[in-house]
Image (cartoon, rainbow, N blue to C red):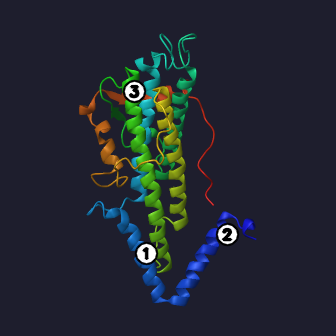
Amino acid sequence: MELEINGLERKQLARRAFLKAGNLAGLGAATVMLTGANKLLGAKKAQTQGVPPDTPAEIFTAALVAEDLATTFYYNGLIGPVIMYPALAGPGGTATDPNPTNSNPGNVNYLQAALYQEIQHADLMRSLLNISSPTADPYQTFYFPAGTFDTLQAFIAMLDTLEAAFIGAYTLAAFEFAQAAAVREYEITVQNKPGLYTPDDLQYYAEVAATILGVESEHRVLGRVIGNENPANNYNYESTDGLTSVYNGPNSAVAALTPFLTSTNGPAYSLAAALAGAPAIYIPTIGGPPPQM
């Protein structure tokens, strides 16, 4: 019965079915598979002619930079002047000691949890890149426009901007990993071509990207809750935010985040300082990446 087939068995059955089709149809099946793979690659890359496909390592690297940027952003929001707005910890309040009569501790908790979650995401990307310590991350300093952490309006506007870019990047990452899995299937079964990743690896990375995308979407909506923007859940569908790739090209997530890596954007904020101070103010949340079947 179908209900008795687990995820691994489903993948094995699908793989055997593909191989059987290839054996029966010979060159014709291989041609169809190649055409399908080329269409998959061409569908998105047609928008950015001359841009090489993103590799898994490049996607992981872009995600790590984004998560480090997010970590630095949420940490400095929790310790900056903006925390003393009544919508957060209130006058004279802090993230860990809100004003008892004029604050919204629940809104502060949203930011504390987001800080912890971004750190978890970054840790995962480091493990995929075999980076042993945050001190070896590509960027150690991020630059935000002056006033970002001073007023609630500026902070929420930046939160929305960043989370929109993260959502777009992870949407594209899921797409690109799924694309790459189809191509790897062809390379393995038709070309007998070795590679670092299996189709199952790449499908799994697409699933992981989707699970992170969901959390980043929560951050965007909860930011709108803090800013009292109604309805907070104002999208029918998430957007790629104008991005067409994760790492390579002028419309990539990396290009969108480049201003935050440049000193002309505004004051400098240290990743190391954020990571050192985060345990005193974040709220741990539950869950990990989905299991790989």
List the residue tagged with mark 1: 36
Res 191 seen here: no
Q: Nearer the viewer, mark 1 or mark 2?
A: 1
Q: Could you tell me residue 147's position as x and y percent? A: 32, 23
Query: Could you classify mark 3 by the number of other residues whose Cα lies within 10 Å: few (under 14), some (14-19), or many (20 or more)?
Result: many
x then y, percent, for residue 202:
50, 62
**Disc number at residue 285?**
none
Taking the view exactly as shown, the residue that stands out farthest to the left is 264
Say which of marks 2 and 3 sits in front: 3
Please give the residue where the numbered disc 2 appears in the rendered image. Answer: 9
- Amino acid type of the residue tagged 1 in the rendering: Gly
Where is the N terminus found, in terms of image quarters? bottom right
Q: Residue at x 51, y 33 (%)?
A: 222
| Distance between the alpha carbons at the discs numbered 1 and 2 | 24 Å
Q: As rendered, which of 96 and 230 lies closer to the eye?
A: 230
Asked whether, in this view, residue 293 is left or right of residue 81, the answer is: right
Measured in 3D between alpha carbons, the distance from the residue under mark 2 to the one under mark 3, in whole angstroms, is 48 Å
